[in-house]
Image: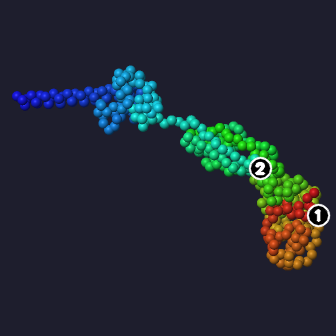
Amino acid sequence: MRKIGYFFIILSVTASVIAGFTNVSFALSSFLNTFNTRYGTAATALNTCALCHIPPGQNVNNLNPYANAFLAAGANAGALSAIEGSDSDGDTFTNITEITARTFPGDPNSRPVVADATPPTVQAFVTPATSNSLTVPITTLTATDDNAVTGLMVTQSPTAPAASAPNWSATPPTTFTFPQGTAPGLKDLFAWAKDAAGNVSTSRQATVDLIITLTTFADVPADFSFFNQIEAVAAAGITGGCQADNPQTADNEANFCPDNPITRGQMAVFLETSLGGVPAPCVGMFADVPTTDPFCGFIELLANDGITGGCSAQNFCPDAPVTRGQMAVFIEAALGGVPAPCVGTFADVPLTHPFCGFIELLANDGITGGCNAQNFCPNNPVTRGQMAVFLAAAPNPLLP
């Protein structure tokens, strides 16, 4: 009889436990269905026991703060609405904000990703007070951000650049260059910073006084070694720039191209313009200089003046570069110079060199002292910048 009693007691307890688990399972299923229906979360990470239970267990007594708040509010559909404005897990985001972001409202370590809306701050921007060049050094440019500064820029405009603009630099720029033709005087510069979210800072301003000499050509700044001579060539009307001297070039009239070799055709224009020559209509004197060649008139005038007879009996070779030896002949012939017998002034110009007399005459006239103390480098090409120097150095100046 006692054994039968114990059996019924055990059976009763077991049945109660099974019934309890069934009720818990039913409650869990019922709550998730209600939650998912209200918030549309059935296919999201929130459709899990972890919504209400603290891992790893699913015991009804192992509830997280959101589940406790739900129970305290009545554990029904109305309770969900009632606790939406609360911050159950204390992570500074309301329950409804977390649910909308599909993060767990009962877990303080699960929180929405907040978009960065705070722009960087430019802390310091310093340039010299004055500059003798269009390129101004930037002494200091620093900026901070709550995450990270991803770009820095300096502009002349006080209008903030777009975060997608092409001129942002990942490192602080060390110089700013004003456009060619910028007038002297006080100029404002504005420094900007941006972050990875695309927020652009307000500007920090610096003012610099440009004390510069205005230049004719973009590629011949005031500190260029041949600046004065090139400006004199331009002022005399001998050249208007790269394109005037070579219509096929990609360069335009903003540039002089001082480092480009000067051609025989360009040399004809330089010399005859310096002498005040006025070309007549072309007659086709040289086989390789058609009457449509833009330099034809000057080339034929140079030949008629006896300065050169061409590179051969039939040709002038207008596109060939002029060597330093040839240049000596051209300039001294234009000046009417008569060479004396050679004495061996330069180690690389023997007495038998065909241009020796003209080279030594050029040196004696002070137009050039050679490429170094011992040599003249007669086969080296002459650049456009060097040609301007030679014209300006002539004893009976070839520049008006």
Q: Amino acid at mark 2?
A: Ser
Residue at 81% x, 74% y is 374
User: Residue 21, which numbered label?
Assistant: none
Residue at 29% x, 33% y is 59
**Residue 395, relative to residue 201: is it above or below?**
below
**Of residues 130 and 79, the one drawn nearer to the viewer in this rendering:** 130
In the drawing, does residue 190 fall left or right of residue 291? Answer: left
Look at discs 1 and 2 and give the one toward the viewer.
2
Residue at 53% x, 36% y is 115
Q: Quadrant of residue 85?
A: top left
Residue 21 appears in view:
yes
Find numbered disc 1 in the image and state the secondary structure of the residue it sits on: loop
Residue at 88% x, 56% y is 232
- On-image quarter of the C terminus: bottom right
Mark 1 vs mark 2, CA separation in Å: 37 Å
Q: Quadrant of residue 343?
A: bottom right
Q: Say whether disc 1 or disc 2 marks the residue closer to the N-terminus.
A: 2
User: Residue 131, which numbered label?
Assistant: 2
Q: Position of residue 229 (x, y in %)?
A: 86, 58
Q: Position of residue 364 (x, y in %)?
A: 90, 71
**Of residues 233 and 176, the one drawn nearer to the viewer in this rendering:** 176
Provide the residue designation for mark 1. 396
Find numbered disc 2 in the image and state the secondary structure of the residue it sits on: strand
In the drawing, does residue 269 fall left or right of residue 2? Answer: right
In the drawing, does residue 287 fall left or right of residue 156? Answer: right
Q: Residues within 10 Å of mark 2 (few under 14, many from 20)?
A: some
Q: Position of residue 250 (x, y in %)?
A: 75, 53
**Of residues 301 and 161, the one drawn nearer to the viewer in this rendering:** 161
Q: Residues within 10 Å of mark 1 (few under 14, many from 20)?
A: few
